Image: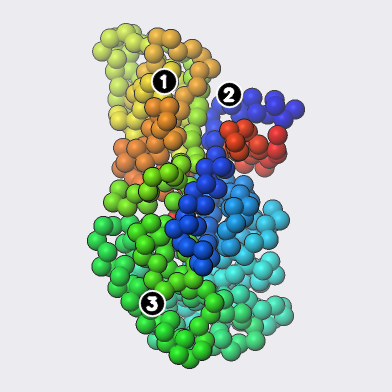
């Protein structure tokens, strides 16, 4: 039964997620963070497209101390999957969901006076205290309190019976650039702030600044925890700040040739006839499109791996399909790799992203719910999910 499901998934477009690679990357990053710092794995946005529940479980198994998501719904999803590790919601909490977050022991970020007021009101109403992290504005200008306000909020948080003041943090704007001065000045602002809290004896146990790029470049500030996302998935924070040796990409995108045919000279391919065959050539249709997350802007430049070699995507990328050039030996049902770890000659997510004019974060995160996922450990498929059908299982 399950084997049938595996074959079903293999014979269409799907993602393969290597949980060993993910845990290996986490291990490397924990070394970089040092044994006396806690480690938070960021699994927001469906674990950057990789699958939040499977990645969160694997991260906890790999020893992470904390998980983070962007929205309360994402935290609820993990709690419903029986993940009991601490979960921090980054960014402003949806005010209407604060009670449920507190009931599910989900930790929230306070970056405004109104957020703290709403949380304290909800907590006292339902008789449930809130584990909170204060978010300090140091230069990103997104969600966070300026130092004066933050100090006042910290004093309140320390003394409110409805608040368990867990942490203070900030987020770097430019740690993925070679130029370090913006990061250093953010660290300076944070240091001044945490020293002030310390002098008032209200410094919480967790102080966290570094994202993946900060961790890789050693810009950790005076912290007791780090927050890593992109690097755990084996992807570079940027072109300027790349992963050190030994990291492994976790995700690969696979499909198949669903129709194999020949174009004659003068035949046009796909909408608007942007590609016209100059000579007769062998082509194939592949059931993957921008609805799956393949960037439409790859048109004219995209290539996929068929039969061990890269072959061009021809004409417009449609919602659900592309047409590609294929080798003479190709047959219907043959495997197509859109991106992966590059070891078989396929493009990496970085290469696809830069060709499409975006970054690897967006490319993997946009892999849609229409793509089934297969999870591997030790090169063996161990579990699967078909998000569209709400189905999942293990082998
Ligand atoms: C997304 C996010 C991270 C993770 O960033 P990476 O560059 O993926 O490591 C860390 N902190 C905050 C506040 C974030 O929003």
Find the distance from the CA under tag 3 to the CA under tag 1.
50 Å
Could you tell me residue 313's position as x and y percent? Answer: 36, 25
Choose between 14 and 351: the one closer to the eye: 351
Q: Quadrant of residue 74?
A: bottom right
Q: Name the residue under label 3.
A: 190
Ligand 1 shown in quarter: bottom left
Q: Nearer the viewer, residue 146 or 114?
A: 146
Q: Position of residue 318 (x, y in %)?
A: 42, 30
**Residue in the foreground of this view, choosing between 226 and 340:** 226
Structural distance between the alpha carbons of marks 3 and 2: 51 Å
- At mark 1, the secondary structure is loop
Q: Which quarter of the rendered picture does the C terminus lie within?
A: top right
Earlier sequence position, callout 3 versus callout 1: 3
Question: Of residues 381 and 76, which is closer to you in this image?
Answer: 381
Residue 26 percent location from the top left of the image: 51, 52
User: Residues at badges 3 and 2 in contact (C-beta under 8 Å)?
Assistant: no
Task: Tell me the element at label 2.
Answer: loop
Q: Is mark 3 within 8 Å of ligand 1?
A: no
Residue found at the very far bottom of the displayed protein: 200
Earlier residue among tags 3 and 2:
2
Q: Is residue 302 shown above or below 113?
A: above
Q: Residue at left 45%, top 13%?
A: 330
Left or right: 170 as drawn, with respect to 185: right
Instruction: Name the residue carrying label 2.
Output: 11
Q: Which residue is drawn at 46% across and 42% down?
A: 248
Q: Mark 1 points at which residue?
A: 308
3D distance between C-alphas at marks 2 and 1 = 18 Å
Residue depicted at 70% across the width and 25% down the height: 4
């Amino acid at each position: 039964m399950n084997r049938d499901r595996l074959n079903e998934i293999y014979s269409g477009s799907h993602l393969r997620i290597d949980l060993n690679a993910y845990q290996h990357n986490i291990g490397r990053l924990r070394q970089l963070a040092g044994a006396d710092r806690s480690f938070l794995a960021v699994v927001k946005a469906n674990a950057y497209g990789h699958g939040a529940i499977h990645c969160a479980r694997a991260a906890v198994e790999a020893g992470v101390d904390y998980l983070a998501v962007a929205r309360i719904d994402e935290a609820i999803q993990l709690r419903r999957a029986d993940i009991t590790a601490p979960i921090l919601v980054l960014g402003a909490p949806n005010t209407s969901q604060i009670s449920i977050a507190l009931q599910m022991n989900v930790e929230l970020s306070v970056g405004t006076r109104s957020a703290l007021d709403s949380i304290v009101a909800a907590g006292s109403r339902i008789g449930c205290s809130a584990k909170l992290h204060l978010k300090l504005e140091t230069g990103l200008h997104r969600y966070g309190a300026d130092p004066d306000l933050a100090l006042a909020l910290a004093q309140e948080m320390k003394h409110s019976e409805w608040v368990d003041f867990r942490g203070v943090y900030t987020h770097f704007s430019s740690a993925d650039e070679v130029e370090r001065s913006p990061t250093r000045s953010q660290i300076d602002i944070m240091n001044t702030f945490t020293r002030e809290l310390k002098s008032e004896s209200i410094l919480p146990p967790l102080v966290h600044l570094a994202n993946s790029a900060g961790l890789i470049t050693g810009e950790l500030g005076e912290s007791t925890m780090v927050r890593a996302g992109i690097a755990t998935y084996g992807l570079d924070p940027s072109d300027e700040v790349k992963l050190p040796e030994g990291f492994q990409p976790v995700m690969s995108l696979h499909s198949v040739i669903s129709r194999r045919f020949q174009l004659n000279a003068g035949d046009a391919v796909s909408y608007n006839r942007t590609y016209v065959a100059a000579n007769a050539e062998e082509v194939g249709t592949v059931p993957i499109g921008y609805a799956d997350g393949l960037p439409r802007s790859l048109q004219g430049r995209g290539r996929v791996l068929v039969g061990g070699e890269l072959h061009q995507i021809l004409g417009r990328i449609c919602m659900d399909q592309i047409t590609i050039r294929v080798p003479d030996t190709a047959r219907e049902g043959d495997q197509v790799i859109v991106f992966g770890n590059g070891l078989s000659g396929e493009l990496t997510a970085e290469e696809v992203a830069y060709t499409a004019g975006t970054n690897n974060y967006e490319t993997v995160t946009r892999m849609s719910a229409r793509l089934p996922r297969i999870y591997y450990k030790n090169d063996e498929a161990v579990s699967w999910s078909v998000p569209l059908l709400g189905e999942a299982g293990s082998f």
